[in-house]
Amino acid sequence: MAECHPVGFRWVMEARERGATIIHVDPRFTRTSAVANIHVPIRAGSDIAFLGGIVRYIIENERYFRDYVVHYTNAPAIVSAEFQDTEDLDGLFGGWDEETGQYHKKAWRYEGADPEPAAGVKESDEEGQPIQHNPFQAGHSDPTLQHPRCVFQILKRHFSRYTPEMVEQTCGIPKSLFLKVAETLCRNSGRERTSAFCYAVGWTQHSMGVQYIRTAAIVQLLLGNIGRPGGGILALRGHASIQGSTDIPTLYNLLPGYLPMPKAKQDKDLATYLARNTSPSGWWGEFPKYFVSLLKAWFGEAATKENGWCYDYLPALTGDHSHMNTVVNMADGGVKGYFVMGENPVVGSMNGPLHRKGLRQLEWLVVRDFSVTETADFWRDAPEIERGEIRTEDIGTEVFFFPAAAHVEKDGAFTNTQRLLQWHYKSVEPPGDAASELDFIYKLGLRLKKLYAEEYGQPRNRPIRDVTWDYPLEGPKREPKAEAVLREINGYTVADGKPVEGFTSLQDDGSTACGCWIYSGCYRDGHNMAARRKPHWEQNWVAPEWAWAWPHNRRLLYNRASADPEGKPWSDRKKLVWWDQEKGEWVGYDTPDFIVKRPPWFHPSKDACGKDTIGGTDPFVMQADGKGWLYAATGLQDGPLPVHYEPQESVVKNPLYGQQCNPERVEWWRKDNPYHRAYDDPRFPYVITTYRLTEHHTAGAMSRWLSWLSELQPEMFCEVSPELAAERGLKNGGWATIRTMRAEIEARVLVTGRMRPLRIKGRLVHQIGLPYHWSTKGLARGDAANDLIGFVADPNVSIQESKAFTGAIEPGRKSRRRSAAISGPPVREIDPKRWQRDLPPARRKPESQHSFKAGESKKEH
Amino acid sequence: MPSGDGFSLSNWPLFRQLKQRDLFGLEQTAASPRTEALTARTASADRIVPSICPYCAVGCGQLVYVKNEKIIDIEGDPASPISRGCLCPKGAATFQLVTGSHRVQHVLYRRPHGKEWETVPLEQAVDMVAERVKRTRDETWEGTDEEGHPVRRTMGIAHLGGATLDNEENYLIKKLFTALGIVQIENQARV
Ligand code: SF4
């Protein structure tokens, strides 16, 4: 955190000054470790084993926050008798379907109820069947937590094998150090104290990435650290508006505000789509209001009740259309045109050579950035061109490079990692032809409307005709006014165009329009709330008048949990939001994240629906049952509880189960994306992990051209321990070649005691550290670390596994910069039959469009 | 060092250091009249424009100092409760990011099989892109999937990028591209 989010880390340092204990868990000793109280070196890819050990410690030693757990989590809920745990099946849950290579999620449900996942059924539907809509009532629960099938007891059994000894054998963390961490964490949680988890998003980049975060959530719920000041799980994200681009998603599976994109097979019409996504209980009961308001914002007068608000203007999904599938689709000739705006995938994404292979198949490519990136210049500046394997003149792709305006040359809002919308103003005009994306897209839209004007008779062109595209223009270049777009995002009443006050004003009858319901209120009464900059010294420590947080300017989500079931703060020290009996409402330092007038003792009636089912002690209002989920009965692909699986490529056999890897992981079995053996691959004996440095920014386009930054980190290097250096003959300051089946790269060697070999089952495991900022352009150059990494993904969100894989290292500049995608594998193949990652039932893997849900398939491209 | 002209004991640095208890000469005694007359570059700005750091998601506050319609400096904003005036090395280098000579000022075009970039006027380039979008969309349109379910889309066009852009920009990208039937829209949030 000190390395990647330095100014955020100043608050950690401030906390330390006031007595907080900082624990840093990282394979490397970094600038964060240097100021932490405890540094825990860990084998990359073993985090669930480590956190699972903490879960076990909390339960076995009865250190959980009982009142919180009983009232605010689903610990008392009773799970159906058919549930089978990984304890019973050597690493698989019950419900595995050998034919589809996926789980039947119904095998994990609660007894007598089907809770909805947090956002309707969007991720959990199987077999195209609508999920039965029973409002979840905790009719089957045991507040004493004794019932053998209650979530708490299942959790206890599930994690029973995650003993300190097992943690030591799996993670390489000495038992005494592990116990010190577990005890410190427990001691610092409860009524009087809270602990927070902070992570950077590399934590999610694993084939069980979602379950990493779930394990942290289980720890935090057991300790009562969610929804309370000083608690939580804080995702420290890497880009200025990466949170914003998730909320208002440039993501294939979502519409603004986490509304799912329609699925072709299931969501055949508006009524079905709404029925499938409207939760009968909890806040997602409001779903139709947000969806109809979005369609009104997009299609204006054309959207009427009679035509289903233009529902059939929306394209539909038929599978996973996420980034890696798009690239593979491109390499196979399916994608003809590609827009890349402010991103440099041939450096920042996995398997750069495969990306370039895709770009070569395109008819046209549009790149928008400050300077010509490696992605824009792939046709003349790439290892395969330099090696003479590909000739520039043979590449048929037409490329457009548009210079982009910088943030100081345009108005707009970034949403930072704590959900804060912060406005930045235009201070000068962009230079030359540089323009904002707002301007570019707006003008492209106008052109397309014109080009299609003659063909509006065809139904497929009507969305282009009807999409609302009237924004006031301003400035010498007649650019669209960003605030007008913000107003549409906020929402307005259709009749008079007045901005709505917030999402509670939205309706499902077409009387309101709103571009993103969770952002509703950011432009209330026509005031740009994101532009508020009241100095911190003029307000309380929550600083509610600095910018604006979604939803409703609530700074801490689920903060109802900061008070006890009766609505009183758990302790004076940790007071945030509480029930004010006199006023008859929730009050506090922060805006309550709860129905303000709903008293703590409120019990929903039996026939209640939607938000009326939220009881006074249900802080987690977005969940169908209002509780924090220790056990996810629905919503996840790869199991209701986290399980330690090894990464796709590991140096060890899974010490916990027969099942080596996440059985639902997504693989791409192709010649241009070869994998290593699951473990003990003699060709690739070391663990590799990648990371960022303070002085550079992700794929480097915003830092490698800056002399001030390049001077501080001038070239690519690899970090190795003195032990590994001795084993491989690597010299500090010399060169090394690092190799995987995908590619080989070279880097300067940094021999440092900050990399420590770990002892696992008596054997030394070495880890190699690689920063990934470099490539061929800029003042500071070097090989791209991500070229080494193959496409493998988590099944829930298709995030790639890039933080734990295996490889080889040798001294010298022996890299010829070969890559599997172009030159064939740089290392000889060995028989894939010996690579089994899966138990026999999980071996059959049906193919989806471009990827495989998991497992081994013979089909090669 | 004292020099011939105008030497006076009271002006002699060592004497001043002793007198002002500034033994190492690191405090006020180090200041010369010239230093005292200097002002910060930022003091001459015509206006100060509030902004936010464009690098990581901490979202530190920035102040942009503008003089004669040129940015002369970018500093941390002390009023921000997030950063209280601090910027890390990247944030502090923002001035170079936005004013550096690496910034391309013209639209560049590489024709199929071409070996060099050419420049094209902005308006023409946007026209060309719009034509290509239409052509590809029309050629690759899918009305239904293999089983006959309506999909109303093109898989021939894809988009990547968003986490470095503004919310308003992402909003228009998603809105326009969805209306065009493009579904392969992705950004760094998944990469
Ligand atoms: S100054 Fe540094 S810590 Fe702050 S937002 Fe910018 S990059 Fe992040």
Image (spheres, coloured by chain):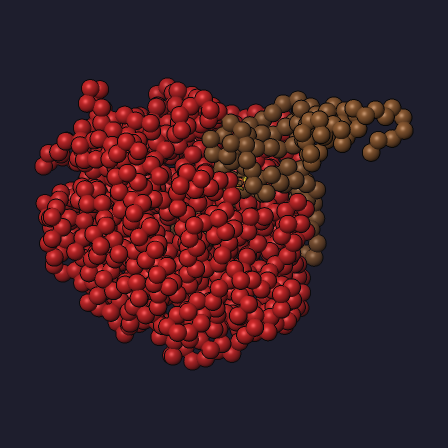
Closer to the camera, A329 or A44?
A44
At 49% from the left edge and 30% from the top edge, which residue is drawn?
B80
Q: What colour denotes chain B?
A: brown
| Residue B86 appears in view | yes
**Number of numbered discs visible in the structure rendering:** 0
Q: Horizontal and vertical percent for residue A443?
A: 55, 35
- Tell me the quarter of the picture where residue A369 sits: top right
- Tell me the quarter of the picture where residue A596 sits: top left
Closer to the camera, A703 or B178?
A703
Q: Is residue A775 above or below residue B132?
A: below
Q: Is residue A281 above or below residue A748?
A: above
Q: Horizontal and vertical percent for residue B64?
A: 60, 30
| Residue A794 appears in view | no
Q: Is residue A778 above or below residue A357?
A: above
At 44% from the left edge and 33% from the top edge, which residue is drawn?
A421
Q: Horizontal and vertical percent for residue A282?
A: 22, 38
At 34% from the left edge and 23% from the top edge, which residue is drawn?
A501
The chain coloured red is A
Q: For the view shown, which residue lies furthest in the right direction?
A: B4
At 21% from the left edge and 35% from the top edge, which residue is drawn?
A564
Q: Horizontal and vertical percent for residue A336?
A: 52, 54
In the displayed structure image, the side of residue A100 where residue B158 appears, left or right: right
In the displayed structure image, the side of residue A636 where residue B170 appears, left or right: right
